[in-house]
Amino acid sequence: MPLALVTGSAEHLGAAATAVGRAGFEVVVWQTTEDAGENPAVLFDCYVQLPGSTMPGVGRIAAPDLVCRIDTLAAVAGRLRPNAAIILGVEDGDGSGLPLAASAAGGLLAAVALALFEDLDRPAARIAVMSVLDLCRPPEEGGVAVIPAVQWEIPTPPLVSAP
């Protein structure tokens, strides 16, 4: 059975872990970086990062949310399989009228996450940004909505031929 890691604030962890489990994953939940030491050899097929994923011991407390979320992503990147799916949960309603996953906040989070994975020499990263409301929706309201999410991939550079 594929293995998924879910990190985030306690208020969303249970619902998100349940939703990911219904999608066919065995789920591991971490709230702190100390949880990572329990099974150091385990690699995850999927990583779901919820808002509030700024785990103690990762980043600075006073840092903006984006920096803390990317620090947390960097901390778990070595525990992800090369082809792992990464779902970045974002809060709903930023006032722009766009679904938040397609808003500037969701796009910026995805772009920085892609840059991180490219810098880590992991260009096969598959990153999706999704609303926490859609991710945690109970099955009677429409089931697990892992997709459609706004998906991002590292662009393939154009081929350049020598003169």
Image (tube, rainbow, N blue to C red):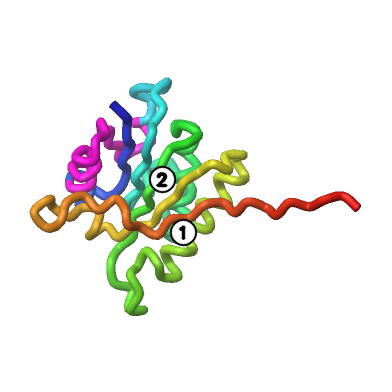
Name the secondary structure under disc 1.
Answer: helix
Q: Within the image, what quadrant is residue 158 found in? A: bottom right
* Residue wearing tag 1: 109
Q: Give the crowd class for mark 2: few <14, some 14-19, many >=20 residues within 10 Å.
A: many
Indicate whether 54 appears above or below 33: below
The residue sitting at 36% across, 22% down in the picture is 39
Q: Is residue 25 magenta?
A: yes
Residue range in magenta is: 15-35
The residue sitting at 42% across, 20% down in the picture is 41
Q: Is residue 130 magenta?
A: no
The answer to which of 112 and 20 lies nearer the viewer is 20
**Quadrant holding the N terminus:** top left
Amino acid type indicated by mark 1: Leu
Name the secondary structure under disc 2.
Answer: strand
* Residue wearing tag 2: 86
Q: Are marks 1 and 2 in contact (CB under 8 Å)?
A: no
The answer to which of 24 and 90 lies nearer the viewer is 24
Residue 69 in picture, x, y percent from top left: 43, 52
The residue sitting at 49% across, 63% down in the picture is 108
